Image (cartoon, rainbow, N blue to C red):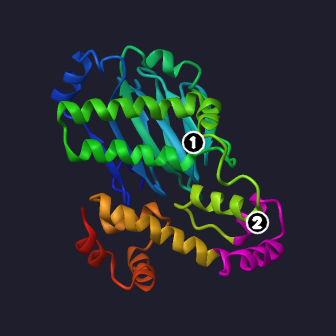
Amino acid sequence: MKRELGFKGERFIYLPLSILEQMEKNPLTGDLYIYSLGYFTKAAFHYIERLNGCDQYLLIYCKDGKGHVRIQDRQYELSADQYIILPPHIYHQYEADEKDPWSIYWFHFKGTKAPYIAQGQDVPHTVTPSVSSRQQNRLELFEEIYTTLKSSLSVEHINYANFCFGYFLSTLLYIQQYRESGGKSEYMGTIINRSIYYMNENINKNLTVQEIASFVNYSPSYFYRKFMQEIGIAPMTYFTKMKINKAYGLLKDTDLKINQIATLLGYTDPLYFSRVFSKEAGVSPQQYRAANKK
């Protein structure tokens, strides 16, 4: 049952050879350019083994669940909010965990700067969640790269996507500077603000009151009462509204399929997502897109 592709809601782009040659020769992109990229969610039975590695560096960023990575004789577990960069031309093997399969963003990349970027990154690095982590910003940057390349492979689109990719890497390699540059977080301070931050950072998951309460270091019962007092609705109801608000933008501004949007927002069943959306918006996702598509 092990497989490389074919996961529900998967998205990926393999760039044509002619485009890759163009990027390699272009002085604007030759130092760092994307070879391929993608996103798999809850990729059960995902398995890759390459006896001689591949010709590119490979960034795997685990957002949820966990998996297992082997580089020659070294083995690692890659868990939620961790990343690793696999070097080229070396045996590697990686797979999703059987019980808790990972959701991953991945980039194959090349360029003269790639060896320097990847130096010391061939072990798991943790992107610790905090009120200044800006993780959702990073994921939105992936969406921007993906949408740019999906819409066109013109020189301008390719250049822009690769510049964005350099920034994406810098948010991981220079994480402290990335967090500090965001200024004082709007989520600093109150329990409610910090809990809303946590919901926003994990909008692709099915959080529980227990998980949110643990993040803000209060008991579930106290947190629930406090949230109800200040916001007026239950935490999970608020979380659902956040997801639907996110769906509005994805329906208007992207060409993602309904099931892909559902997956990005943590819904494993697209039909259930459509019912929730219809209840909140008063129209189905398809009707909303038809009326508001840019």
**Image quadrant of residue 166?**
top left
Q: Residues within 10 Å of mark 2 (few under 14, many from 20)?
A: some
**Image quadrant of residue 26?**
top left
Q: Which residues are magenta?
A: 209-235
Does the rendering let one see residue 262? no
* Residue drawn where x is 65% and y is 58% of the image: 198
- Which of the image's four quarters has the C terminus? bottom left
Q: Which mark is residue 271?
A: none
From the viewer's perspective, is residue 276 above or below residue 183?
Answer: below
Q: Nearer the viewer, residue 246 or 258?
A: 246
Q: Considering the numbered disc 2 on the image, is that residue within a helix, a strand or a loop?
A: helix
Residue 130's x, y, as percent?
A: 69, 47
**Pointers 1 and 2 in contact (CB under 8 A)?**
no
Q: Nearer the viewer, mark 1 or mark 2?
A: 2
* Residue drawn where x is 62% and y is 37% of the image: 179
- Which of the image's four quarters has the N terminus? bottom left
Q: Nearer the viewer, residue 151 or 75?
A: 151
**Image quadrant of residue 114?**
top left
Residue 268's x, y, as percent?
A: 46, 69
Provide the residue designation for mark 2: 213
Main SS category, magenta section: helix
How far separated are the C-alphas under marks 1 and 2? 29 Å
Q: Nearer the viewer, residue 211 or 176?
A: 176
The earlier-in-sequence mark between 1 and 2 is: 1
Asked whether 218 falls inside the magenta stretch, the response is: yes
Provide the residue designation for mark 1: 68
